[in-house]
Amino acid sequence: MALSAFFFAVMAAIAKLLGKRISAQEVIFVRGVLNVAFMAWWLRRLRLPWRGNQTWLLVLRGALGYTALSCYFWSVSRQPLATAVLLQQVHPVFTAILAVWFLRERPGPRFAPAFLLAALGVWLVAPHPASGGTAPGTPSDLLPLLVGLLGAILAAGAYVTVRHASRTEREETIVLWFPLTSVPLAAVGTWVAGPVWPAPVEWLWLLLVAAAGQVGQFLLTRGLTRVPAGRATLANPLTIVFGALLGWIAFSEPLGGREILGGAAIVAAVLLAGSGKKAAAVEAD
């Protein structure tokens, strides 16, 4: 889960770089086409079926993931990278709630203190007027914040769907259906936004976006199929730390004492959550 957080942060940083000229929908479309081609080759090599057993569930997972990624990329291109990543990483709250409702998963006894530490870290990393950030709730900030939060809610739904699908589907099949569903949806979005032919260097960045997203998706799916969804996704706030560092290095976004303390709190939360039992009890349906 920690490695998936790193690759997703890299993906977000490149998407922010591309967002200056290429729409988020076009980035998602090209990423999806490349990932579908790779996964089709990979499944063929492993001699695994691509259709799965519950097509409707795989399509639902893909649609939720596509919409969440659209919100995320749009948010990334319109605010500091650390802030956009921070909003996305609120999803463990919604994931834990949805996992209780739909999967009947019970978070372990260490989830509450770990979550409080993660929440403290999120609060510390968030922009504050005193540290140079803008006051929350201004018209220029409100829409990106709301879109980012919506992306977090949709991502939580996608994670719970992955956990549910893992009962009947192979990891590789679940990973395939995310870009497979995204491609036609993003094609429409690209046409609406207006396609732009990428420059040679932008093609390279698009390849890196696809590669980082693919690796991150593999690691995320593997993590979610091995531990309860609510606890597994608590590790994802590490993306905030990586996002803040990449924002500082690539975009000269400030990284001060609050960000460092927030990152330390989040890492402590992940270590605390990971030191408990590997799986929580799941009630029979």
Image (tube, rainbow, N blue to C red):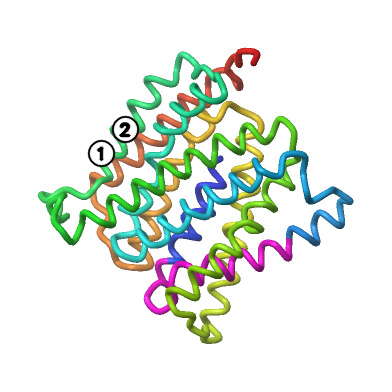
Where residue 154 sits, quadrant-wise, is: top left
Residue displayed at 50% across by 39% down: 157
Q: Looking at the picture, which amino acid does disc 2 mark?
A: Ala
Where residue 255 sits, quadrant-wise, is: bottom left
Residue displayed at 17% across by 55% down: 133
Please give the range of residues in magenta.
16-38
Q: Nearer the viewer, residue 36 or 60?
A: 60
CA gap between label 2 and label 1 equals: 6 Å
Q: Looking at the picture, which amino acid does disc 1 mark?
A: Trp
User: In the drawing, does residue 183 fall left or right of residue 98?
Assistant: right
**Crowd tier of the residue under label 2, counting other residues whose Cα lies within 10 Å: few below 14, some 14–19, many 20 or above:** some
Residue displayed at 84% across by 48% down: 49
Reading the image, the residue beneath label 2 is 119
Q: For residue 90: magenta?
A: no
Residue 122: image location, x then y, percent: 31, 39
Q: Nearer the viewer, residue 6 or 145?
A: 145
Reading the image, the residue beneath label 1 is 123
Quadrant, the N terminus: top right
Residue 219: image location, x then y, percent: 63, 45
The kind of secondary structure element at disc 2 is helix
Query: In the rendered picture of this protein, how many numbered marks are placed on residues?
Result: 2
**Crowd tier of the residue under label 1, counting other residues whose Cα lies within 10 Å: few below 14, some 14–19, many 20 or above:** some
